[in-house]
Image (cartoon, rainbow, N blue to C red):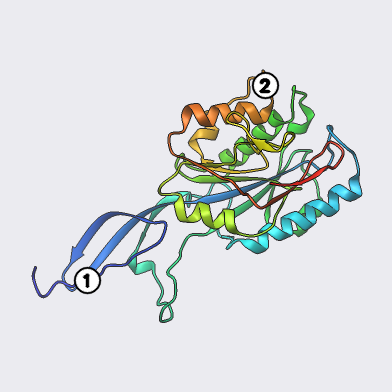
Amino acid sequence: MDSNVTVLIVVLKYFTPATFDLVQNRTIKIFSYNMIYLIITASIKNKIGSRNATHRKNRYIDSITQILSLIQADASIKPTDSHSSGSITTEHLQPSPEGADLNLQRVKPIIVENNGLRETYLDGLSCDVVYTNNNRFNFRHKGVNELLDIKEVINKYNIQDDDVVIKLTGRYKLLDSTFIELVKNNIHVYDAFVKFFNVFTKEYMFDDCVLGLFAIKCKYLKNFEYKCIKSAECEFADHVRQNVDKIMEITDLKLDCCFAEGLRMLIV
């Protein structure tokens, strides 16, 4: 190698080397990367389950505030932005303190609420809020309404196929950042992160899952449609099992669930 050419090697967690452009006395290293989007679903005026507006409001505020405190949010991404997937070079990097972890992976949180555009208490949670009208539709289960909401966010933010979507039910409280960090550290290895579990029998089930929290490459959401033959949880579990090769099966989400039916609580 020519002694006049300096090779700069930078190790970035969550980034995949794509190409090198060697220039005399410097190296520009290009990295391709995928975004992580946290889509938090909400329905202030619920049609299914217990209707306790005060409890629902308090639970949304508490749970969403908690998850926002656990992530390193990227506020720069706006609807129809082009940040979804792209590249970064070493010229974009700023000097970091001695021994600092060079971690450029951020999570973009977005709340989606489905009772129409208006002002709500969700607007004060320091997070993008997308309002849809999907709660007006009646289906066999509310999973269809929720999927419509998620797909509306995907379209609005131009989320790319290989970007990762973490879906969280807004009334479910994540107790710590373990799941978020697990996804961030393994998105280059796995395409889906799911807990296969029946929340009623409280036991592992191959073809059932926790829909309150999962992570998956966006392309597997884009091509998914409910048939409303089985429960939403079972249909999504079947979709993941049949279409995703690289699945990380989660045993402990550290998720405090608050089910709409009777406001039953369960940590999974």
**Disc 2 packing (10 Å; few <14; some 14–19; many ≥20):** few
Say which element carries label 2. loop
Image coords of residue 153 (percent x, y): 61, 41
Q: Give the labeled residue for mark 2.
A: 230
> Which mark is in front, 1 or 2?
2
The residue sitting at 63% across, 49% down in the picture is 253
Residue 201, relative to residue 258: is it above or below? above
Q: Could you give the CA–CA distance between mark 1 and mark 2, rounded to whole angstroms?
A: 58 Å
Q: Mark on residue 88?
A: none
Outermost residue on the bottom side: it is 98
Image coords of residue 112 (percent x, y): 69, 44
Say which element carries label 1. strand
Q: Where, by quadrant of the figure, is residue 175 drawn? A: bottom right
Q: Give the labeled residue for mark 1.
A: 26
Image coords of residue 108 (percent x, y): 58, 54
Disc 2 marks which amino acid? Lys
The answer to which of marks 1 and 2 sits earlier in the sequence is 1
How many badges with numbers are in the image?
2
Quadrant of the image containing the N terminus: bottom left
The residue sitting at 77% across, 53% down in the picture is 122
**Disc 1 packing (10 Å; few <14; some 14–19; many ≥20):** few
Disc 1 marks which amino acid? Arg
Image coords of residue 146 (percent x, y): 69, 35
The residue sitting at 65% across, 60% down in the picture is 176
Q: Which of 136 and 231 is in front in this view?
A: 231
The residue sitting at 46% across, 33% down in the picture is 244
